[in-house]
Structures are given as structure tokens and as C-alpha cells.
């Protein structure tokens, strides 16, 4: 009897402690999603309508913008992956792994705006890159405010986020497997291709997730570096909310971004990894 | 073999040079008398003294730090209690649902968080300003804290809690004297991560800040849109040093807590 009593009070206390957290879930997780869906069904005057979603799917502008955003996110992911994988592989072979990891993390702690700002200086008409081009005889080019500069700076910013999960995945591979591969006569290249690459795919997947999704929604870079040439989904949402004040359309694009995000996560997530998480 | 090793070292060196070059470029020109980021004319500390004399900028720095401090403290408290709650939830379905809800804001792009919070604040008629910024920062920091604290809770020896209960400890004593002391490492790293996320945030703040209140990121954005001003370079150098200190601080804390952990393990023989 006594035990029962205390159990009941324990439960009460636990719920009381958890109350702020549950409130947070309701107010700041569930309510905003609901509001986004609700707002997407309203037109500029606040009347209920399916107009936004219809307009999105019938408008060439919106569809090509979405395609462009996807294309650039894909390119950014590809560029970072190509640079990161070899670097991550070499990093796992170095002696001072912890130090290198720190050096890799450090740039991610620097405000993204400052990094963008640095590139405004580097890529500008009389910046260091153009002076170099002048020096070798190519002559000055318009680099800032082009699609290329957007791709370059976005890849620069996302690089550590690709490299870290790959590095973690490679360093988690059991060294005896690599040893075994060598013992069985595989050379370094064959070992990389047949053993290390397949076993580090999880890291690649999380890297792709960590780079692709934020790249779809980058909005500050498109303005500061891309000169508004590349419109990402993020830029479109920001403009609808803060510039043209068409919140209904902004919410609609937001929901499309969320749906795309889930598709990307589904495509890149690994069933085995998931099982590991839910078993915990 | 040595040749390929040399090449790989070179490649690595190249990648890291690329990673740091823009930052060092900023730092270098922060000492430039010339006023541009193109040609270094002569050394000056003028831009630094400008930063330190810029009352508005200093106010913004203080605001940014206050927002980060308040939001990460509140988020740490709510998140830690939430993590403990999640850990002791019996039904695995409910636990899964809570964890999924927890992760929604972690995977959501900043623009989505920012715009949906803007909708929320507008709906309830909340005045945009420092409070809406703090509330938003608390909101996006909570799941980070939960994520940092949960692994510590899972490592916690369940029989210790049983033992404490058998010895007559009430729920509060179990919480304050058994659970909390054993998860301090997670709580600290949660707080730290929340703090840096808040300092770093631009997108969410940009949506919910309204007109009167500005944080450092938003201020840098509006200044950068107007072009180069070496005052920003000086400011970023100072921020770079601050981040360096933060990273080393974090490194030190995590090393320290790891050592404490080891010691504890040695003592309990586990």
C-alpha cells in the first residue's frame, strides 16, 4: 500500500518536472508546424484558399526556383564530398588526430556572417583573387555576385560539416579489417575501394544530410555573395515573409522545403543505423 | 609509399590552408591603415580603437552575450529536466514519440524555425524584440541540451538509483544527489553548445527580432550589405580570439570531465 502511494507521487513529481519541457514541445515544436500549415492555406487577405499550393505547382518561376535550389544544393554537396573524403581519410592516418579534429571544428565556431564577409573582400573587383588574375595576365573578372561565388563560398562554409562525419566513420572502422585486407593481398587502393569506402558510407550519408539540407535553405549568402542570382528555397521563404509580406506563399514554400527535407533524410538514412538508435 | 604520403600531407595542408585563409585574411586587414581589404598600406590599431569606442556596437555585443547567457541557462534547466523525464518514461512508444518531437527542431532548417516562430509570435500578439529573440533561442537550444544529457543518463547505473531509494531517499534526493551529480558533464556540454548556438545564430534571430533589437550577427549582416568597413574586420578578429578561447575552454572541460569519469570508474571498479 505504502509503495503504491509513493509510486503515484513519484509519477506526479516526474510530470511536474517535465512540465516545462512538454510545454516547449507543444508551443515551440507542434504549434509552429501547425501554424505553418494553417498559414499556407490563407491568401494575402487571410481568407481560406488552396490558391498558394496551386500557384506553386503551376508557376514556372516557383518550380524552376525549386529546381535551381536543388541543383545548387546538390553541387555544393558534391564539391564538399569530393574535397572532404580524401582529406578525412588522410586525417585518420595522421598522428595528432585530436589536434586536427580541433582545427577542423574551429572554423565552424566562427560566425558564418564573418566568413561570408571575408569573401566579399577576397572576391571583390580589386580583391586578392582579381589581383592575382591580373598578375598572371588573365585580367580582372566579375567573381563576386555570380553563381560561381555562391557555390564557392557555400562549399567553403559547409566543408567541415561534410568532413567531420566521414572522419568519424573512417576512424571507427576496425583496423583489423584493413589489416586483413592487406594480408589477403589487396593493395592500398583496393582496400580503400572495397573495405573503407563501403564501411564509411554511414559517415557519407550523414555528411550529405548535414550539407544538403542547410544548402537548400541558405538565404543570407545568396544575397551577400550570390547577388540574388541564385534563389534558394530559403531565400524565397525569407523574401515572402520579410519583404513581400506574402506569408501564405512563404509558408507554402516552407512546407515544400520540409517535405523535400524528409525525402532527402529518407533517401540517405540507413535502416541499420536507425535500428541502433531505437533500440537504445 | 613515402611519395604518396608526401602528397597526402600536402593535400591535407592545402585543405586546411583553404579553411583558414579567409579568416586570416580578415585578421590581416584589420590592421590595415588603408581602409580597404585590397592593399595593405601600413599598420594601425585605429579600427580596434573604433570598435571599442563604438557605444552602439558594444551595447549590441552585451545584448548578444546576455541573450546567449539567459537562453542557454533556461534551455539547460528545461532540457535537463526533459531529458531526465524522457529517460524514465516507461512506455517505449511514448519515449520514441518524445525523442522524435525533440529532434524536429534539430533537423529543421533555420528559415523554417524562424518563419514559424514569427507566425507564432504574431498570432499571440507578442511584441517582437528582445523577449521574442530570447524565447526563440531557448526554444532551439532545448533539444541540443537534451541530446547532450541523454547519453549520460543512459550510462547512469540504475542500481544506484534503486540503492538510494532502498536507503530511504525521496525522489528529490535521488534527483539532486544521485542523478544530477552524475550527469554534470552532459549538462555542461549542453549548456556550452546552447551558448555557442545562440551566439552564432543569425537566421532565426533575423526573423523574430523586429526593429528595435539587434544581435551581433544581424548587425554584421546589415553592415556587410553596405560594403567593407575595417571595423568589422577588427570586430571579427576579436570574435575569432573569443571563439578560440571558447573552443579551448570546451576542450579543457571535456578532457577534465573525461578524467573525472575515469577516476570515478577506477574508484567504483567499473
Image (cartoon, coloured by chain):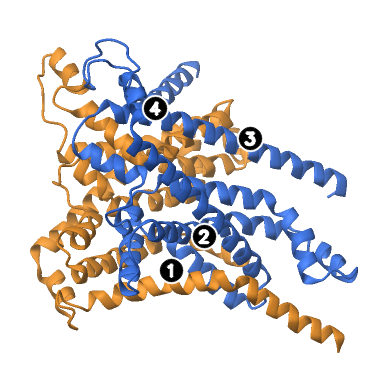
Q: Position of residue B134 (x, y in %)?
A: 43, 57
Q: Residues within 10 Å of mark 4 (few under 14, many from 20)?
A: many
Q: Position of residue B86 (x, y in %)?
A: 62, 69
Q: Residue at x 74, y 54 (%)?
A: B182
Considering the numbered disc 4 on the image, is that residue within a helix, a strand or a loop? helix
Q: Do residues under tags 1 and 2 come within 8 Å of each other at their CB atoms? A: yes
- Note the chain letter of the orange one: A
Question: Is label 3 on the same chain as label 1?
Answer: no
In this rendering, the answer to whether B158 lies above or below B203 is below
For this rendering, which residue is in front, B93 or B50? B50
Q: Do residues under tags 2 and 3 come within 8 Å of each other at their CB atoms? A: no
Q: Residues within 10 Å of mark 3 (few under 14, many from 20)?
A: few
Give the chain of mark 2.
Answer: B
Residue topped by disc 3: B252
- Could you give the CA–CA distance between mark 1 and mark 2, rounded to whole angstroms? 10 Å
Q: Residues within 10 Å of mark 2 (few under 14, many from 20)?
A: many
In this rendering, the answer to whether B107 lies above or below A119 is below
- Note the chain letter of the blue one: B
Specify the farthest residue to the bottom: A1
Give the chain of mark 3.
Answer: B
Residue topped by disc 1: A28
Q: Residue at x 63, y 65 (%)?
A: B81
In the displayed structure image, the side of residue B159 where residue A79 appears, left or right: left
- Could you give the CA–CA distance between mark 3 and mark 1, rounded to whole angstroms? 33 Å
Q: Earlier in the sequence, mark 2 or mark 3?
A: 2
- Could you give the CA–CA distance between mark 3 and mark 4, rounded to whole angstroms? 22 Å
Residue topped by disc 2: B142
Q: Name the disc covering residue B237, or none.
A: 4
Q: Position of residue A85 (x, y in %)?
A: 42, 38
Amino acid at each position: 500500500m505504502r509503495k503504491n502511494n509513493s509510486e503515484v507521487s513519484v509519477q506526479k513529481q516526474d510530470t511536474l518536472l517535465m512540465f516545462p519541457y512538454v510545454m516547449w514541445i507543444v508551443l515551440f515544436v507542434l504549434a509552429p508546424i501547425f501554424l505553418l500549415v494553417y498559414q499556407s492555406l490563407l491568401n494575402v487577405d487571410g481568407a481560406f484558399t488552396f490558391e498558394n499550393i496551386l500557384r506553386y505547382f503551376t508557376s514556372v518561376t516557383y518550380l524552376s526556383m525549386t529546381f535551381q535550389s536543388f541543383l545548387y544544393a546538390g553541387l555544393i554537396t558534391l564539391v564538399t564530398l569530393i574535397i572532404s573524403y580524401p582529406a578525412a581519410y588522410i586525417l585518420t592516418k595522421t598522428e595528432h588526430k585530436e589536434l586536427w579534429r580541433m582545427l577542423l571544428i574551429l572554423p565552424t565556431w566562427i560566425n558564418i556572417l564573418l566568413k561570408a564577409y571575408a569573401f566579399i573582400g577576397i572576391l571583390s573587383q580589386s580583391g586578392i583573387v582579381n589581383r592575382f588574375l591580373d598578375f598572371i595576365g588573365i585580367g580582372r573578372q566579375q567573381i563576386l555576385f555570380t553563381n560561381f561565388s555562391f557555390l564557392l563560398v557555400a562549399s567553403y562554409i559547409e566543408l567541415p560539416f561534410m568532413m567531420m562525419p566521414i572522419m568519424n566513420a573512417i576512424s571507427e572502422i576496425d583496423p583489423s579489417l584493413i589489416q586483413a585486407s592487406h594480408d589477403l593481398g589487396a593493395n592500398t587502393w583496393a582496400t580503400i575501394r572495397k573495405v573503407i569506402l563501403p564501411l564509411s558510407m554511414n559517415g557519407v550519408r550523414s555528411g550529405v544530410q548535414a550539407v544538403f539540407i542547410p544548402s537548400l535553405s541558405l538565404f543570407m549568402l545568396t544575397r551577400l555573395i550570390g547577388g540574388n542570382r541564385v534563389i534558394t528555397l530559403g531565400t524565397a521563404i525569407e523574401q515572402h515573409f520579410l519583404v513581400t509580406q506574402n506569408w501564405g506563399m512563404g509558408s507554402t514554400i516552407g512546407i515544400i522545403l520540409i517535405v523535400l527535407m524528409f525525402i532527402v533524410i529518407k533517401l540517405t538514412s540507413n535502416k541499420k543505423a536507425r535500428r541502433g538508435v531505437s533500440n537504445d | 609509399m613515402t611519395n604518396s604520403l608526401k602528397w597526402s600531407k600536402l593535400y591535407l595542408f592545402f585543405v586546411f590552408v583553404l579553411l583558414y585563409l579567409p579568416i586570416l585574411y580578415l585578421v590581416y586587414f584589420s590592421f590595415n591603415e588603408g581602409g580597404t581589404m585590397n592593399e595593405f598600406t601600413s599598420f594601425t590599431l585605429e579600427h580596434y580603437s573604433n570598435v571599442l569606442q563604438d557605444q552602439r556596437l558594444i551595447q549590441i555585443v552585451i545584448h548578444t552575450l546576455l541573450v546567449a547567457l539567459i537562453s542557454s541557462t533556461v534551455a539547460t534547466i528545461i532540457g535537463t529536466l526533459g531529458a531526465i523525464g524522457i529517460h524514465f518514461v516507461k512506455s517505449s512508444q511514448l519515449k520514441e514519440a518524445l525523442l522524435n518531437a525533440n529532434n524536429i527542431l534539430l533537423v529543421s532548417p533555420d528559415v523554417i524555425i524562424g518563419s514559424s516562430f514569427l507566425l507564432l509570435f504574431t498570432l499571440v500578439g507578442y511584441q517582437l524584440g528582445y523577449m521574442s529573440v530570447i524565447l526563440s533561442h531557448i526554444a532551439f537550444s532545448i533539444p541540443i541540451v537534451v541530446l547532450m544529457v541523454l547519453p549520460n543518463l543512459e550510462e547512469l547505473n540504475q542500481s544506484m538509483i534503486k540503492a538510494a531509494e532502498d536507503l530511504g531517499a525521496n525522489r528529490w534526493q535521488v534527483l539532486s544527489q544521485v542523478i544530477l551529480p552524475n550527469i554534470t558533464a552532459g549538462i555542461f556540454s549542453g549548456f556550452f553548445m546552447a551558448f555557442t548556438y545562440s551566439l552564432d545564430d543569425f537566421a532565426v534571430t533575423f526573423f523574430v527580432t523586429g526593429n528595435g533589437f539587434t544581435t551581433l550577427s544581424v548587425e554584421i549582416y546589415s553592415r556587410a550589405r553596405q560594403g567593407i568597413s575595417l571595423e568589422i574586420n577588427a570586430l571579427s578578429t576579436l570574435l575569432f580570439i573569443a571563439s578560440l578561447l571558447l573552443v579551448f575552454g570546451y576542450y579543457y572541460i571535456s578532457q577534465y570531465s573525461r578524467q573525472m569519469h575515469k577516476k570515478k570508474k577506477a574508484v567504483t571498479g567499473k
